[in-house]
Image: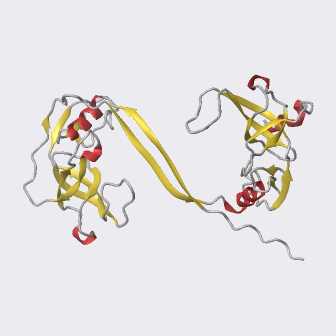
Amino acid sequence: MTAPSPPEVLRAPLVVEFPFTRSLGPVQSAFLTGLREGTVLGVKTSDGKVMVPPVEYDPVTAEEIRELVEVAATGTVTTWAWNDRPRPQQPLDTPFAWVLVKLDGADTALLHALDAPGPDAVRTGMRVRVRWAAERTGAITDIACFEPYDGPAGGEAVPHSGRFADAVTGIVAEARLDYVYSPGRAQTAYIAALSERRTVGERCPSCHKVYVPPRGACPTCGVATTDRVEVGPAGTVTTYCIVNIKARNLDIEVPYVYAHIALDGAGLALHGRIGGIPYDQVRMGLRVEPVWTEGGRYPDHYRPTGEPDADYDAYKELI
């Protein structure tokens, strides 16, 4: 009789994205509003250096700085890297160079894209200029990119009040991360068991703690965990919290309880929602069991088993 072959290790694309909203102080507000108006502003530090993009505090003295100056929209490439496969939402949808450009009148470099036909057309020291976006809103993307330039150099930085009509006071940056995630051998087996409505962990051969979900190795002893152990299905609430704020795209009425649940036989607690009982009756030591929905790949929630509460000494080490 041959042993069943282990499940193929899972892999799946994963996207993490969220909008990051922040307000702007007077320096950043002037910088982004200036871009909207086709003006590049920097800030002068206590030792006379001009920083573009501007910062709000002197990097040497840590003092607040607000002395704004206008610099040219032309400059020199100080270093670069070729990007042959642009990703979504990057400045250009054709291959381009990421460049650090020291604008004329500035002492520091600005990172942006350079539109060039290929890497052979890019070099350190080449002259470039800003290509402004057709529609500008007060964001770094108001600079569509840089482009090669063979005209005269811009002059020195000149003082600027930083005052514009209808100043930009806040921004929303859409953060996004695309990658392929693999849960690994141990968690692949755990997920496969859940599809059969079983919960399987792995025992450390040294300290004998059973990890659920399994991690493939014991974080305490540093040894591989290969001995699979089925735990539960019932368990004990070790601690919990009451959720009063409704999460977006989560169809659960508040308030509800989210708890740490130590399944019988497990060496640490996992997370789960508690249902089938008023939220204010959930307590430490409550005995619970999983509730599965039709076609569900994991327990929808846990409900009371009706057993007497577990003694504190039985789960205190799992809190």
> Which residue is located at x 80 percent, y 52 percent?
197
Q: Residue 184 in the image: state x and y as whole percent.
A: 67, 61
Image check: 222 left or right of 17? right
Callout count: 0
Q: Residue at x 87, y 47 (%)?
A: 265
**Residue 138 image point, x, y percent:** 26, 38
Q: Residue most toward the left?
A: 152
Residue 177 drawn above or below residue 34: below
Horizontally, residue 277 falls left or right of residue 307, namely left
Please say whether residue 249 is visible from this viewpoint: yes
**Picture layout, residue 205 above or below residue 239:** below
Occupied quadrant, residue 84: bottom left
State the image quarter where residue 292 is shown.
Answer: top right
Q: Residue at x 19, y 58 (%)?
A: 147
Quarter assignment of residue 273: top right
Q: How is the image coloured?
A: secondary structure
Residue 148 x/y as whole percent:
17, 61
Split into 4 quadrants, where in the image is the C terminus? top right
Residue 203 visible at all: no
Q: Position of residue 185 (x, y in %)?
A: 71, 63
Residue 221 or residue 11, whichever sits in front: 11
Instruction: Name the quadrant of the N terminus.
Output: bottom right
Which residue, as the protein is rendered here, is positioned at the far bottom? 1
Q: Residue furthest top?
A: 280
Residue that sits furthest to the front in the current view: 294
Going 18% across and 62% down the picture, which residue do you hit? 126
Residue nearest the observer in this picture, 248 or 84: 248
